[in-house]
Image (cartoon, rainbow, N blue to C red):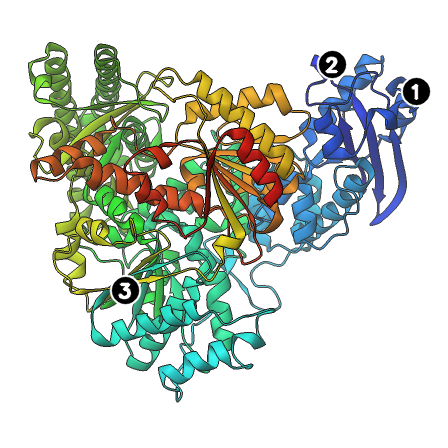
Amino acid sequence: MNKFVIIDLETTGHTPKQGDRIIEVGLVVYEDGEVTEQFTTLVNPNIEITHFITHLTGISNDDVRHAPIFEEIADELHAIITDAYFVAHNVPFDLGFINAEFERVGLEPINLSVIDTVELSRIFLPQASSYKLGQLAESLHFVHTSPHRALSDALVTTELLDYLLNKLKSLPYETLRKLMLLEGKLKSDLSAIFDEALNKAIFIADETNQIEEFRGFAFKKQSVTNFPQLTETPSYGELVDHLFYESSGFANYLNDFEARPSQYEMATTIYDTFQSKKHAMIEAATGTGKSLAYLIPAIYQAVTNHERVIVSTHLTQLQRQLMEKEIPLLKRVLPFPFQAVMIKGKQHYLSLARFEQVMQSLEFDNYDITLTKAILLVWLTETWTGDFDELTLPSSGERFVRTISTEAEGGLDPQSPWFQHSFYLKAIKKAQKADVVITNHALLSSSLTNEKQVLPAFKKLIIDEAHHLEETAAKHVGFQLHYVAVHRLLKGIGSTEDGTIHRLAERESVIANVLLDQQWDKRWEDAKAELDQLFRHLFQYVMKKQYQQGAMSDVGRYQYTFSSTDHTDKQWQSILEMVNRLVVLLEDLKEVLSHLSSYFVKAKYPTDIIQEIDYFKEQLDITIERIRIYFLQPTLDTEVKWIEIDKDGAQNSVYLYQEPIDVGEKLQTQLFKKMESIILTSATMTVKRSFAIFKERLGFTNNEIVEKQIDSPFSYSDQVQLLIPNDFPVAKFNQMDDFIYATCEAIVSLAELTKGRMLILFTSYDMLKKTYYLLKEWVEDEYMLIAQGISSGSRSRLKKNFQTFEQAILLGTNSFWEGVDIPGSDLTCVVIVRLPFQPPNHPVYQAKANFYKKHGHNPFMSVALPNAVIRFKQGFGRLIRSSKDRGIVFVCDDRLMTAKYGKYFIDSIPPIDIHYQTTKELLETAEDWL
């Protein structure tokens, strides 16, 4: 069958059973590569179309008033949809909706083979950033004249279908053969299409020899990296002058490039610091262009001195940005060649050995895992890196890939058939030969405690987003342990009926005999049961303590810090007895695995079996050690241990944390004193224009570090106004309703002036929710409200949705305070609801406060205030992202003006006009200024 009926519906909502109706139908018949028929009509739903749907589709109540009702078009529509594949971009929605409507008017539901282009796009475009139809059309350069109009969407879906089917037919034979094994659990009926493609597919390599086959898998052939040889280079001064001030420099490659003295100053400062072999702290304000400013001296230093320079970022997204944007630009503009590579932790890379194993077991896979396996098979023909971050995976798929990562693989033996193809080992080898290696703080911090060094040797380091270094390092020096991780470990090991043990026992009968002799299944079941009982009791214990203390965290969890009174609590004594029983059971399992491993080593069995057993034995050992440290060893004065539970989650949703209170000494001994030169940079490092607190936290006790503040090139006094109301109700704990109401009134009034385009930053998710639902009652028909944790999607997707609508308000907390860039007219107003102080009952804050108090410091001035000022600067920085941006920062919290510490916040942002007046006067000021 080579006929496809592609359909798109615009509707009043998502649920026909609750009365939602179709308002427009678009249909395309596509046969033998050509559009043979089109059908489109508006439909009168006989119910009101909401403002939101009108805003989304452009279809109003007036438009459909004289349109036919569905009953009048049903027979004609039903007759067209026959003898073809039913195709839609999200088949469950369109097919479900139209069948509900057919049944409502007395017609038989459609029962055809289906193709879902969302599913096909996920599989055959595995590296797409989004699978929304409009964004796919844009990335593939399809003409999409009227997004969210039915016929336009149907025509674009037709073009997408054709593209995807051609992509399918171009895949290697081995990939198609394995996809065929998965087809039965997919939504789309692709069996006949796969059969046709398999008959025409090539077996091993394509004509350009870009694909290779190994052990039944087809993947992209890894090119041999030719590392460039150094040619004659100019002096550093000549180079930066050329790049910034000559027409053949950046100006030749970037439209509207303007030399920024601040960027030039930063690039020069870093190079000078390298030459003097010192460390430096450089706060580079928004607009400096710090990525290029530190990459230029890093590359020059590495190439001219034949030494490697490491660049570390907090987020892996920034790693990718550097590799995909700044590095390619510098390869074009620099007058000499260089090599830059990116490396991450083991959990980011696919293990081909583990993937081969899981592809042998398909029977019990759910839909998400089946879809993920299909995505990975196609991705293997495209990826150079094997880095999971290239993919957009379904939620269960993200959990699944952890089980097939290089981390889950354990150590890869050189005798393994997959050794030469390991993505992770290839990344390490490339890093060892590169001039510049781009990594992240997590991998950098792991070197503080891990004897196995992943990063190649280096003496010079640049740490971007340096304000996150202390927190990241503390997490890696400490550890966390939670029920899901231990349960996943036990499940991964498995019994003779399931999991790795089952698979190995089926492969080698001697394993089954040993396990039977050692009563493996009973020990394994007992360990799982004891684990479940322990974590359920921990959950109940924390609930009891929270009830006694009347304390509650603001992150959707309860948190409890250990104290000396716990040891006298009878319930805690019972918990310790469970801990001891669990440790014994886990030790028993480890002992059996050790026995198996020793046997196979002596018998010279295949190394992949030994590696799997040794990996699980090592993971059990780590788990046992952490349980002992956490429960059976006394808490030191230099550390904090605490428990968190999901108060609305399962009865075993328990997370155990241990962290050092002060990580500065560790950073000094393991990092700063070992390096010749480290550059720490960020847009937010100082408090009241001083690095003192930041230096102290990183363990610096002297002035042997260069300090540099580079001001923004933006004219903040001309671009932003700071407004603070003096008539808001006082915000008191458990008495926030009046404050929230006043905040909502101000948001609505400001939105009228800015036409939406507002980012509202909260310190409390509870306050965000209350604000959202109150605003929803007031202005839902006028503005698109997008809220973190309420609206579905990741942070980047919420940001994109916000930018899509003309009148939108975005509400966020936590991660929205930094790293969210919305330049230009898309954002005109940032509202900071409360000064971003950490909850005073957070275990880490409490421990640090006590630590500083014991050492003669004021905990508020040393911990709470600096953290809040840094966070405030980040939130303030969301508004102005370019020299053309203009807008308002509205701070609802008047402590900025009334509290003695308010000047720390004011003095930490650029000099701007500040208005401290009644809300009415502020709105008049805003209207005049805008």
**Which dot marks residue 461?**
3
Decide: is 386 above or below 826: below
Rate crowding at label 3 as few (under 14), some (14 to 19) or many (20 or more) other CA atoms within 10 Å.
many
Q: Amino acid at mark 2?
A: Gly
Q: CA distance from mark 2 to mark 1?
A: 18 Å
Rate crowding at label 1 as few (under 14), some (14 to 19) or many (20 or more) other CA atoms within 10 Å.
few
- Please say if the residues under marks 2 and 1 sit with CB atoms less than 8 Å apart: no
- Please say if the residues under marks 3 and 2 sit with CB atoms less than 8 Å apart: no
Q: Earlier in the sequence, mark 3 or mark 2?
A: 2
The residue tagged 1 is: 72
The residue tagged 2 is: 19
Q: Secondary structure at mark 1?
A: helix
Query: Percent position (x, y) of residue 830?
Result: 51, 40
Query: Percent position (x, y) of residue 740?
Result: 47, 22
Of 663 and 257, nearer the camera is 257
In the picture as drawn, the residue positioned furthest to the bottom comes out as 232
